[in-house]
Image (spheres, rainbow, N blue to C red):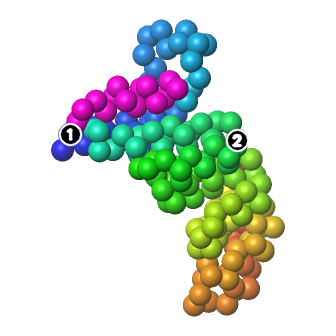
Amino acid sequence: MKTVTRLIMAGLALMIGFAPEAPGAQQRRTRVSQLEDCLAECQASLGQEGAEILGDCKGGCWHAEAVRLRSADKCDVLLQEANFGGMGGYKNCVTDVAVVVRDYTICRRIPDPVWRGECLSRLALETGNTAACTEIPEEYSPNVDIQVVRNQCRREAERAPRQ
């Protein structure tokens, strides 16, 4: 159980870029891209015990790279590579990039309307960009009138503290 917990924590740390650096890592960073560094650290930290979650770890590296480069195009690998996070990982990656660059149009990349709505809603709340609320798709809330959902989003975005 401890091993699984450590592996999960290592993967999360790698995904958000808070993994501690080993001595000499700064020199290595000049020779190797951060993505390649992350992938190597992922492989080394998981070893044989974590082979089944290696894809999630590598997906976290691609996610971190996309956010670092502020490029939703880098999220595409999460859909293309087996076990790299699938559509859920892709949605999280695109959403994080959209929030970082403060551009709600990036959420349009997400094909699933519910997850696209989540992206738009989160972006509006975290950035105060109420224009994102107007793009929330009807399918996001099939049981509540979409105008009510969009108006609520707008009110919450206006009240939310800005980063």
Disc 1 marks a residue whose amino acid type is: Lys
Looking at the image, which residue is at 41% across and 45% down? 56
Res 147 → quadrant: bottom right
Looking at the magenta stretch, what is its main secondary structure? Answer: helix
Looking at the image, which residue is at 48% across and 56% down? 86
**Residue 126 position within the rendered picture, expressed as x and y whole percent measured from the top left:** 67, 57
Q: Which mark is residue 70?
A: 2
- In the image, residue 139 sits, relative to residue 86, either above or below, namely below
Which type of secondary structure does the marked residue at label 2 adopt?
loop
Name the side, left or right, on which 97 lies relative to 16. Answer: right
Query: Mark 1: few, some, or many residues within 10 Å (few <14, many ≥20)?
Result: few
Looking at the image, which residue is at 53% across and 12% down? 28
Residue 33 seen in this snapshot: yes
**Residue 22 position within the rendered picture, expressed as x and y whole percent measured from the top left:** 42, 16
Residue, far right: 131
- In the image, residue 84 sits, relative to residue 147, either above or below, namely above
Name the side, left or right, on which 84 lies relative to 125. Answer: left
**Residue 96 position within the rendered picture, expressed as x and y whole percent measured from the top left:** 62, 50
Res 7 → quadrant: top left
**Residue 102 position within the rendered picture, expressed as x and y whole percent measured from the top left:** 75, 52
- In the image, residue 87 sits, relative to residue 135, either above or below, namely above
Looking at the image, which residue is at 63% across and 67% down? 111
In the image, which is nearer the foreground, mark 2 or mark 1? 2
The region drawn magenta spans 36-49
Give the CA distance from mark 2 to mark 1.
Answer: 34 Å
Residue 45 is inside the magenta segment:
yes
Report how many numbered discs are placed on residues in the image.
Answer: 2
Disc 2 marks a residue whose amino acid type is: Arg
Name the side, left or right, on which 74 lies relative to 159. Answer: left
Residue 15 is inside the magenta segment:
no
